[in-house]
Image: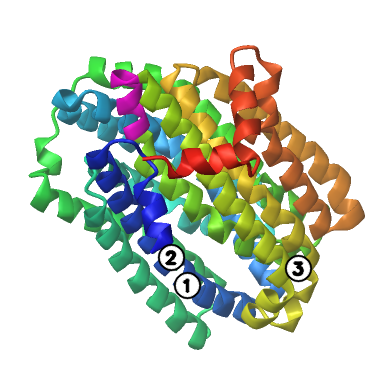
Amino acid sequence: MQIIQALKSFLPQSQTKQTAVKGVSWLAGDKILRLLVSMFVGALVARYLAPQNYGLLNSLTAFAALFGPIANIGVNSLLLRDIAANPEKERKIIDAAIVLKLIGGMSAFLLAVAIGVTFARAQYHPLLVIFATIHFVFYFFETLEIWFYAKQRQSIPVLAGQASFLLTSAIRTYLVFTDAGLLAILISYSLDSILGGLFVYLSARKHLNFTITSIHTSFAAVKELFISAWPLVLAGIGTILYMKIDKVIMPWITSTYDVGIYAAAARLSELWYFLPYSVYTVFAPLIAQAKRSNPEHYLKRIQKSLISITLITTIIALATSIGGPVIVSILFGAAYLPAIPALTIHIWSLPFVAMGLIVEVWLLNERLQKLQVARTFITAGINILLIFWLVPLYGPVGAAIATLVAYSYPGLFANVLDKRTRGFFYLQLQSILPTKRNFRLLMEK
């Protein structure tokens, strides 16, 4: 009950409070369900494949993820902002985004396969790359999901996504028990994204009167959206580089066994990323609305986001550090016990990921998104250098240290290096301290 009351106190306007709490509830409920199922099914897959093949699977999915920003074309954040700020133009914005993401998805798929053919290695065989990236062709359906979120109708895409997720999780479980092998399990991950997109499309046909044949846009509209989005495309490439490059590089400098051990630790840590991403998805359009209408509310919403999201993720990181040995033993078994030290370090990247998302919202609304490009590539560079230095020395623990150091840069320390963001850095420092002022501000009506 106290948690619900705290959520209701998060924002100053009553209607906004109800909308935000409802949105967070739907998204958090969805992610909690996914968390529980993923922990169970993911543990089955990890036990079945054993560390070496599990490391190969994670290297493939990480390699595929490198091309995700090209498929997304960086428009998701722009859609949340622009539809909330210009609801009268929402259909024009959506149509242009669908065309742009269709182009991006095809380009990402073809580029990934071309690289797989050119640099053929056992872990990046072209056939494996095809099945790991085929879902990019269907990424344009995600635009409809963002449309629902921007209209604060989270329940519809959530239910569609849950249907796809539960179905493919059941399929994956069946594949484990029938000893179907690595390729079949890899295909099931792409199938989840494809089915999720199709289910959202069917929901949009019903609730938004949308059909593929009703799309009407122009080259000028697509070009205008791309001009706004390209800095975010580059920022997205940089972000995915520093988030996934560790599992892509590690097979080149260490064994797939080490990759599997580290992947288990990272998996348990990254399962909690749903919390900051849920808050980001719900509050990004609300913050954009406040930026347009009420500067005082705008600043308060950002500060409350920082305080609450830092508090929650710090508690989770502390609990995971303490309970890590039990969690790894129960879920993954004795073969993955060497992942415990890496998990204890990696989980502390969670608060920095959370703060980084709020920084992104602020930069976007201040029209400073170009800063994200330089920051993300600097972060990727830090991560790559640390991986080459630390992994040969410390294995999975070295990879976890590299991740923690790299994530702290865009989430906090980058802001102190630029005079345009230094004020936000001081706001962050105030927000991460457990002071009476912060608790009063968080509970303020």
Q: Amino acid at mark 1?
A: Leu
Q: Is residue 86 left or right of residue 321?
A: left
Q: Amino acid at mark 3?
A: Ala
Question: For the point 66% across and 15% down, which residue is it?
Answer: 418
Of residue 387 and residue 427, the one placed in the foreground of this image is 427
Mark sitting on residue 36: 1
Q: Is residue 435 a member of the stretch shown in magenta?
A: no
> How far across and down, in percent of the image, does residue 169 sit?
41, 73
Give the magenta-colored segment's residue range: 286-294
Pick the quarter of the image with the C terminus: top left
> How far across and down, in percent of the image, does residue 304 sit?
47, 38
Q: Main secondary structure of the magenta part?
A: helix
Discs 2, 1 touching: Cβ within 8 Å: yes
Pick the quarter of the image with the N terminus: bottom left
Provide the secondary structure element on which disc 1 rests.
helix
Which is in the foreground here, disc 3 or disc 2? Answer: 2
Q: Along the polypeptide, which appears first: circle 3 or circle 2?
A: 2
